[in-house]
Every structure is written in structure tokens, then in C-alpha cells.
Image (tube, rainbow, N blue to C red):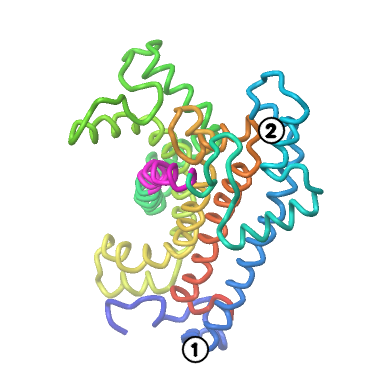
Amino acid sequence: MTAEATPSTVAGPDDTGPAGAGRTPRPRSTAAYLRYAAGKLAGAVVSLLAVLVTSFFLFRLIPGDPVKFMTGGRPVSAEQIAAYRREFGLDLPLWRQFTDYCGKALTGDLGTSYQFHVPVIDKISEALPNTLLLTGTAFVLYTALGIVLGTRAAWRHGGLGDRFHTGLALTLYSIPSFWLGLLLIIVLSVGVGPVPGLFPTGGMESGGETGFAHVVDVVHHMVLPVVTLVAVEYGQTLLVTRSALLDEMGGDYLTTARAKGLRDDLVRRRHAVPNALLPTVTLIFVNLGRTVAGVILVETVFSWPGLGGLFYQALSVPDLPLVQGLFFVFAAAVIVMNTLADLLYPLLDPRVGR
């Protein structure tokens, strides 16, 4: 065994064969992986179909008449109300509305928004880049922050830094995102705090800016919502990374690597951390989908023109086609990211699904 030994060359508790035999799991064959992947993909398709069905019936329980919104509260005749219902298919029996909805959805047609009178897919395409900008920035920051701080907390577990970061992560993770967002607005925007008016209260831009000044303006508006998302979300990555690394630190392969004379930071960086990141990789994919779906409250608090804010507007009408379409997109993001994590994990650890 060389000084660069890894768990794949040292017997461990998860190895196959008799204990101490030094045999490691054989790499998964292509056929076995394809069978595994086919099962996961089939499960994802079934989940998406279930979401499609659920979204139709769930939002028809919302109180409120879309026709009243479309008429703007004006007194209208029964003939006009009937015309509105015919235009949007609301006069059809529920089973017919359901079959029409499913048939169109399977071809990519999510209907026409009652509120904006444009195809739902167009409104989603318009708001999606804004949500990806916000959530993508927050995702990169809280993932990197969680991994770095989680690694340091585990390697120095029991110390002051470990206790501080773990306690702070648990505290922030338990805080509702909308409450933290409102608190940041009060302290840093409205003027109650020590630095009044430091950041805008909401929106994505002030308007009238072009070129680099426009970029700076957008970044300025992004600060508070990104900080809110990072503060609430980084704790989970930190705790998972810390726990996984603590489990790895007792491994025989780390003792062997140290016995070969490797420096402590090299043992951590080349051996312990890569293996501890396996559960973190799964969490990263899950968080990516969950962040897109869970940004509704943050975008609403900060009036960010993304999918979350659009969902809130549609829900208040209720704009049934738009609500259904957004719900499907949010659920699909979670399902797709979970499926990608399932497909990637066997490539990182051949023992999965054996």
C-alpha cells in the first residue's frame, strides 16, 4: 500500500466478503447500472404524472371565482359571464376539464393565464431567468459556505469554532425565510437599524440604468434576498458535511495514511473530505431543486419578479392555469434533481443499489 491509499484499497466495515479480507465492492456493470437508472427514471415519470393530476384537483379547492376577477368587479350580464366561462372552458364538466388539461399538458401546453391572457408557458419563461439568477447565486454561495465550514468544524470538532458554527447553523436553519427577510428589510432598508437605506426594500432594478450601471443596480437589489436564502440554507449543508466527515475520521485508511507520514491537512484534503462528500453531493442536487421550489416566500417579501412572486399573484386571483403550471414546474424541479442525484450516486459509490 502506498502513502496515497484511499478507502478503495483498505478494508473497512462496508467491504464485501469476510471482515478483514480486504475485498472491496466490484464496480457496477453497465447493464446493472442501466437497470438501476431505468427504475429511477420510471419512478420520476410516475411522480411527474402524479403531480400533474394533483395540481389540477388541488387548486380547484381554492375559494374564489376567476370570472369575477376577469370582469374586474364590474356589474356584468349573465351572458357575459357565460361567455367568459366558455372562453376558458370553465363551463365544461370537471372530468372534461381534466382530460383536456392532461392532454394539452402532455404536449407542453399549460393553458392560458386568466390574469395576463397569454400562454402560461410564456409567463413562466419570462420569470424563470430572474428566479435562476437569484437562486443560482444563493445556491453557489450557501453550498460552498456549508462545505468549507462543515469541513473545518468536523476536523476541529469539540472546539470553540465547531460549537459556534454548529449552533449558528442550527439557529439560522430554524428561522423562517420570510421572517428573516422582513427583519433585514427593517434593519437595512427601511431605516430602523443603524444603517438606514443601505439596500432597496424590493424589486430587481431601479430603472433607467444601462450597461455596467444596470448590472451594479441588479446586484444591489439582489443582496438582501440572496443573504436571506444563504443564511437559511447553508446550515443544512454544513451539518451534513460535518456529520459525514466525523464518520470518516475514524476510518482505518486515515490511520494508515497518517502512519505513512502524510501531513494532517493532506490526509484531510485528499482522503477524508472526498469520501465524506458523497452524502453532500446528494444534498446538493436535492437543495438545487428545493431552492427553486421554495423561493416563493423570499421573492414575495422582496417583490422579486420571478416564479415565486408570479405564483403568489396567480394564487390570489385564483389564476388556475398559471397556478397549476407553476406548481408543476416547482415539483418537477425537485423530482428531476432527486433523480439526477440517484443516477449520480452509484457512480460515486458502487455499493449503492447492489
Q: Is residue 242 above or below residue 134?
A: below
Residue 330 placement (x, y as % from top left): 56, 49
Label of residue 221 in the image: none
Please give the name of the residue rendered at 37% of the width and 53% of the height, measured from the top-left corner.
Answer: 151
Question: Is 349 or 211 nearer to us in this picture?
Answer: 211
58 left or right of 151 in image: right
Quarter of the image holding residue 163?
Answer: top left
Please give the name of the residue rendered at 41% of the width and 67% of the height, measured from the top-left corner.
Answer: 275
Question: Which residue corresponds to mark 2?
Answer: 66
In the image, residue 202 lies in the stretch drawn in magenta:
no
Instruction: For label 1, count other residues whose C-alpha is less than 10 Å away and answer few (under 14), some (14-19) or many (20+).
Output: few
Residue 295 placement (x, y as % from top left): 50, 40
Please give the name of the residue rendered at 70% of the width and 27% of the height, measured from the top-left corner.
Answer: 68
Q: Nearer the viewer, mark 1 or mark 2?
A: 2
Q: Is residue 162 above or below residue 21?
A: above
Residue 242 placement (x, y as % from top left): 45, 53
Q: Is residue 172 above or below residue 77?
A: below
- Quarter containing the N terminus: bottom left
Q: Is residue 179 above or below residue 189?
A: below
Under mark 2, the amino acid is Pro
- As drawn, which residue projects farthest toward the front? 79
In the image, residue 131 lies in the stretch drawn in magenta:
yes
- As drawn, which residue projects farthest toward the top? 192
Report the span colored magenta.
123-139
Question: Which residue corresponds to mark 1?
Answer: 29
Instruction: For label 2, count other residues whose C-alpha is less than 10 Å away and answer few (under 14), some (14-19) or many (20+).
Output: some
Upstream in the sequence, badge 1 or badge 2?
Answer: 1
Quarter of the image holding residue 14?
Answer: bottom right
Under mark 1, the amino acid is Ser
For mark 1, give the secondary structure: loop
